[in-house]
Image: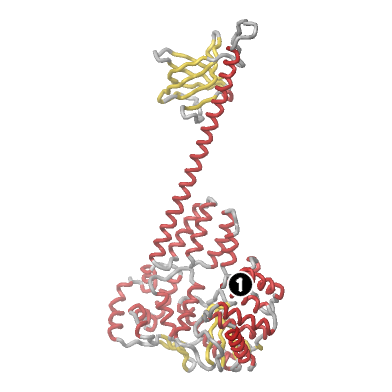
């Protein structure tokens, strides 16, 4: 183990020495950052290629200024050192790839770049495999003599009918302009049928015969386009690369190629050993988190925070892992994750909905965020907004299976919530019923206790008269026909079992208990009872006047 560690340290030192031997420069435009040890011309040429790709790809989809959530770093070097990412790989502070100086990478890199532009700039999803097909079509774009050549065939396995159809429509002068309208409509979320009618004024099926004949011929045309007017020497300024960034570049490259976390951590530790800085500690912390070494990661993050300097780097991911979500969002306003994590630590659904809505606006193609938003809005009693969020989750699903799963999740979630609401209502009703029964039983127990006390003979043997703590009551069972209310009193018109009329009054409704046989409280309506209802009334007799009601029990 010691020998292996020594060899790894030696290798890291050799890689770092390889980076340090040349003068490194930096130039940037749009989302691109180019670092190079190959001189100004090579750096500018690479950035020019990237900017032309961004411009023409955006023009084809109706987007003039494509952006990305994270910066795209391209290392243009004469002698690649260490393990280098030839395709786009995600690293400490964004995307990273390495180009040989004086040349451009193959189609795989540009396909990745096209898909990244789609993911970060389009709110909806294009139908089927159209997004991948479109990215494949642009992956073979060439810059030749100041011109852009579009439509060069990819590998045979990628030369699908879908690719041939799109290639035909974009390279045919008669359909190229309309095809850009088609793609713009699809990118905006229009369904395929509507998009084709808007672009070509005829349905998609009407073009199939032309496309089939083109594919059968097997001769794929190309389209030469004028590039974006751009003078690299004027547009792209050159500055020296910061030493703090150069020190962590070998480790950033390892992270971008997906090297084992321990190897990545050792590379960042080597950079820290050269000179401690926030970028090195941030990278080390991210590697430690991948290794599940949370305590050591926390120490590295605290060290990063203590050295943080905006002139060196934002350390956005490090701030997020420290729980400083507001600061992380300020460093990268296009990143949704700080709002997702802010929502996760909110207990109330209203605040949770607020943060998740922000996240969904920033990452509208993420069905998981829309699903979380819909659930939070439902809990916050924002039913209409929750309905829209559920539809958005299904609309941006990546596959039909995922879309079906979203629909099923919505139905299951809403049913569970409705069941919970119904259960809560039933619980409250049962509690109310139990409380009425408890009070009634308590009153009856008090009466029985008093009766037993009064029925006992005294020591002298004298007769004991019954004593009540209230007026004596009598019971009447019959049919309630109507209730007439006037002022604060009510008059009850009833019939006994023989049909003989009886009248009772309610002098103070607040002192009368009205319930049914399940002991649930009910209300007495001031109107004719349709149909008449059987009741049991306890009342206090009043000589020469109707009895005064004490309780009313509705019978079945």
Residue 370 higher or lower than 499, as above or below: below
Q: Secondary structure at mark 1?
A: helix
Residue 536 higher or lower than 76, as above or below: above
Residue occupying the point 56% across, 74% down = 69
Q: Residue 61 placed where, x, y %?
A: 46, 76
Q: Residue furthest right?
A: 306
Where, by quadrant of the figure, is residue 130 drawn? bottom left
Task: Specify whether 47 is left or right of 178.
Answer: right
Query: Which residue in the protein does label 1 denote?
Result: 317
Q: Is residue 528 visible?
A: yes
Q: Residue 241 placed where, x, y %?
A: 65, 87
Within 10 Å of disc 1 (Cα), the crowding (few <14, some 14-19, many 20+) is: many
Q: Is residue 487 visible?
A: no
Q: Nearer the viewer, residue 209 or 295?
A: 295
Task: Specify whether 271 is left or right of 181.
Answer: right
Q: Nearer the viewer, residue 79 or 62?
A: 79
Q: Residue 265 placed where, x, y %?
A: 60, 78
Quadrant that contains the N terminus: bottom right
Residue occupying the point 47% across, 29% down = 518
Where, by quadrant of the figure, is residue 323 drawn? bottom right
Q: Nearer the viewer, residue 552 or 150?
A: 552
Q: Nearer the viewer, residue 311 or 296?
A: 296
Report the label total. 1
Q: Residue 527 placed where, x, y %?
A: 47, 24
Quadrant that contains the C terminus: top left
């Amino acid at each position: 183990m010691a020998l292996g560690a020594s060899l790894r340290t030696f290798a890291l030192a050799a890689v770092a020495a390889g980076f340090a031997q040349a003068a490194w420069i930096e130039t940037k435009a749009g989302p691109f950052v180019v670092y190079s040890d190959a001189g100004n011309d090579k750096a500018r040429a690479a950035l020019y290629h990237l900017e032309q790709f961004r411009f023409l790809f955006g023009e084809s989809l109706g987007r003039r200024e494509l952006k990305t959530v994270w910066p795209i770093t391209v290392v243009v070097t004469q002698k690649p050192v260490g393990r280098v990412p030839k395709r786009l790989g995600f690293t400490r502070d964004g995307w990273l790839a390495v180009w040989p100086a004086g040349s451009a990478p193959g189609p795989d890199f540009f396909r990745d770049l096209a898909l990244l532009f789609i993911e970060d700039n389009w709110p909806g999803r294009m139908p089927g495999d159209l997004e991948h097909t479109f990215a494949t079509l642009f992956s073979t774009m060439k810059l030749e003599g100041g011109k852009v050549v579009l439509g060069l065939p990819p590998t045979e396995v990628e030369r699908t009918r879908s690719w041939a159809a799109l290639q035909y429509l974009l390279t045919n002068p008669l359909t190229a302009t309309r095809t850009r309208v088609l793609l713009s409509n699809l990118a905006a979320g229009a369904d395929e049928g509507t998009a084709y009618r808007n672009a070509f004024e005829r349905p998609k099926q009407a073009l199939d015969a032309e496309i089939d004949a083109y594919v059968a011929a097997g001769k794929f045309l190309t389209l030469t386009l004028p590039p974006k007017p751009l003078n690299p020497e004027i547009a792209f300024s050159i500055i020296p690369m910061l030493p703090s960034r150069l020190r962590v570049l070998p480790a950033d490259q390892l992270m971008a190629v997906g090297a084992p976390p321990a190897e990545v951590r050792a590379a960042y530790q080597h950079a820290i050993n050269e000179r401690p800085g926030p970028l090195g500690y941030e990278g080390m912390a991210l590697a430690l988190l991948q290794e599940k070494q949370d305590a050591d990661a926390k120490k590295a993050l605290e060290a990063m925070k203590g050295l943080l300097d905006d002139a060196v780097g934002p350390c956005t991911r490090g701030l997020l892992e420290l729980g400083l979500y507001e600061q992380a969002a300020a460093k990268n306003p296009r990143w949704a994750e700080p709002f997702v994590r802010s929502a996760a630590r909110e207990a109330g659904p209203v605040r949770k909905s607020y943060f998740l809505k922000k996240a969904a606006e920033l990452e509208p193609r993420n069905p998981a965020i829309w699903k979380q938003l819909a659930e939070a809005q439902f809990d916050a009693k924002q039913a209409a907004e929750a309905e829209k969020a559920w539809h958005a989750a299904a609309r941006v699903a990546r596959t039909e299976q995922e879309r079906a799963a979203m629909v099923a999740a919505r139905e299951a979630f809403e049913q569970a919530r409705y069941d919970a609401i119904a259960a809560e209502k039933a619980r409250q009703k049962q509690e109310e019923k139990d409380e009425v029964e408890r009070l009634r039983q308590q009153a009856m127990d008090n009466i029985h206790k008093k009766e037993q006390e009064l029925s006992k003979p005294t020591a002298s043997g004298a007769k004991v008269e019954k004593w009540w703590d209230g007026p004596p009551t009598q019971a009447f069972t019959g049919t309630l026909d109507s209730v007439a209310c006037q002022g604060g009193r009510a008059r009850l018109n009833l019939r006994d079992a023989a049909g003989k009329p009886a009248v009772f009054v309610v002098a103070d409704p607040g002192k009368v208990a009205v319930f049914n046989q399940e002991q649930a409280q009910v209300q007495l309506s001031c109107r004719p009872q349709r149909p008449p209802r059987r009741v049991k009334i306890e009342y206090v007799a009043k000589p020469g006047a109707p009895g005064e009601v004490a309780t009313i029990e509705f019978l079945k």
